[in-house]
Image (cartoon, rainbow, N blue to C red):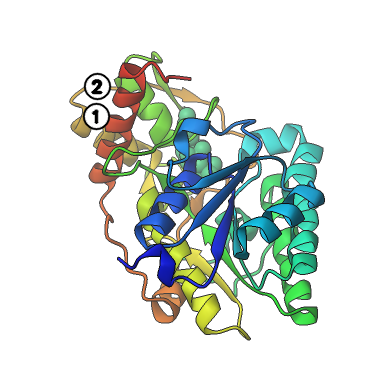
């Protein structure tokens, strides 16, 4: 760990009070980076931002706030997490996704370029691939999102590519697969209201917060008919951002689009079996209709990130991911911080 005084500038983390953003803040601080969080607190939590990070309440689409924050805190790079992230919701309210993800990112990038920010790490998603023809899916596969969430993120990737060609800014677009778990030291976890992600739902069921878990379809073309995903521990994902940032600084003329996943898929039923074992409960399962916008299988080919960054998975263990998610859920309930 290096001391903050050895770093050339501070990092602005948008959405740093949210789930993945707050873990990235921890990883940056652990690596010695000075951090400023910009968050509206619409879905994030002030308590999720450690005291060691500065905090600005505001919107990434507010170019004045972004410009003033960059100047005041000597920001040299932005890690951009703020946005909306529910596939199902995006199908019913696409304009929310094109506003919060695409349009807001465009404003943020414009403010970043105007303020002289040189490096940008973007929270992208495996949903940019849509229904991949081949799994594991590599970065050069066709990007044909099947829901507005994936499209809203893909459009931002295109904006970044064009901006990086025209201005002195390089970027990393990290295409996340399924993020789950919580900080193993118990400093943060999934706290956002209304989260619908499978492992989160499973631990809520295990702690009695909900009665059952719905399985959204068992007639997919997968070994047991349920959806297959590549689940990655949130702290491994956070570490990938620090490595991507340092790579961008070391390679100022290059940009990177990379999958972040473990390269191994689990079905909904396999996840629930692991959750039963870890929680020592039999979580009730009910078969429900397919959810709109869900592809059958999404598994990362992670060759590129392994070849480009020093990043290596450290917590590639589904039982450990569920255990960390469960510990966080229990801690939230004990502290009365429950949603
Ligand atoms: N899923 C499910 N029940 C739930 C939540 C999710 O069966 O309560 C399934 C979903 O259809 C998909 C997988 O679990 O196949 C992962 O969904 P999640 O919402 O966790 O992440 P996504 O892949 O949509 O980003």
Q: Is disc 1 in contact with disc 2, using a CB cutoff of under 8 Å?
A: yes
Quadrant assignment, res 27 = bottom left
Q: Residue at x 79, y 46 (%)?
A: 62
Helix, strand, or loop for circle 1?
helix
Percent x, y of residue 248 = 55, 76
Pointer 2 residue = 282
Q: Going by the image, does 96 lie left or right of 222?
A: right
- Which of 218 and 232 lies nearest the eye of the viewer? 232
Task: Locate the N terminus by quadrant.
Answer: bottom left
Q: Is mark 1 within 8 Å of ligand 1?
A: no
Q: Going by the image, does 305 lie left or right of 158?
A: left
Percent x, y of residue 143 = 67, 64
Residue 137 visible at all? no
Q: Residue at x 50, y 65 (%)?
A: 259
Pointer 1 residue = 276
Quadrant assignment, res 12 = bottom right
Helix, strand, or loop for circle 2?
loop
Q: Residue at x 77, y 37 (%)?
A: 96
Percent x, y of residue 148 = 73, 46
Count of numbered badges drawn on the protein: 2
Between the C-alphas of marks 1 and 2, the distance is: 5 Å
């Amino acid at each position: 760990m290096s001391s903050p005084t050895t770093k050339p500038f501070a990092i602005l983390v948008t959405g740093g009070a949210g789930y993945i953003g707050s873990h990235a803040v921890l990883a940056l601080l652990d690596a010695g980076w000075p951090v400023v969080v910009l968050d509206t607190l619409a879905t994030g939590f002030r308590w999720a931002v450690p005291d060691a990070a500065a905090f600005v309440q505001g919107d990434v689409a507010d170019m004045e706030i972004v410009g003033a924050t960059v100047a005041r805190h000597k920001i040299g790079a932005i890690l951009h997490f703020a946005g909306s992230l529910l596939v199902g919701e995006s199908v019913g309210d696409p304009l929310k996704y094109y506003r919060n993800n695409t349009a807001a990112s465009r404003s943020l990038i414009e403010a970043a370029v105007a303020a002289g920010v040189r490096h940008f790490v973007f929270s992208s998603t495996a949903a940019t691939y849509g229904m991949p023809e081949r799994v594991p899916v590599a970065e050069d596969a066709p990007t044909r999102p099947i829901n507005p969430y994936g499209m809203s993120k893909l459009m931002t990737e295109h904006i970044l590519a064009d901006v990086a060609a025209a201005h002195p800014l390089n970027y990393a677009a990290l295409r996340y697969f399924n993020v789950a778990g919580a900080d193993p030291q118990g400093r943060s976890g999934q706290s956002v209201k209304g989260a619908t992600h499978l492992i989160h739902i499973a631990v809520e069921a295990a702690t009695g917060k909900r009665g059952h878990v719905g399985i959204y379809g068992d007639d997919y073309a997968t070994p047991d008919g349920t959806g297959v995903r590549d689940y990655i521990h949130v702290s491994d994902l956070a570490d990938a951002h620090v490595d991507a940032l340092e790579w961008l600084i070391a390679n100022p003329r290059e940009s990177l689009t990379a999958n972040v996943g473990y390269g191994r898929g689990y079905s909904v039923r396999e996840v629930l079996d692991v959750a039963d074992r870890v929680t020592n409960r039999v979580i009730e399962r009910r078969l429900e209709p397919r959810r709109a916008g869900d592809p059958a299988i999404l598994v990362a080919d992670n060759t590129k990130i392994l070849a480009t960054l020093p990043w290596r998975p450290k917590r590639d263990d589904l039982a450990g991911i569920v255990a960390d998610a469960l510990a966080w859920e229990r801690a939230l309930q004990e502290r009365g911080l429950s949603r």
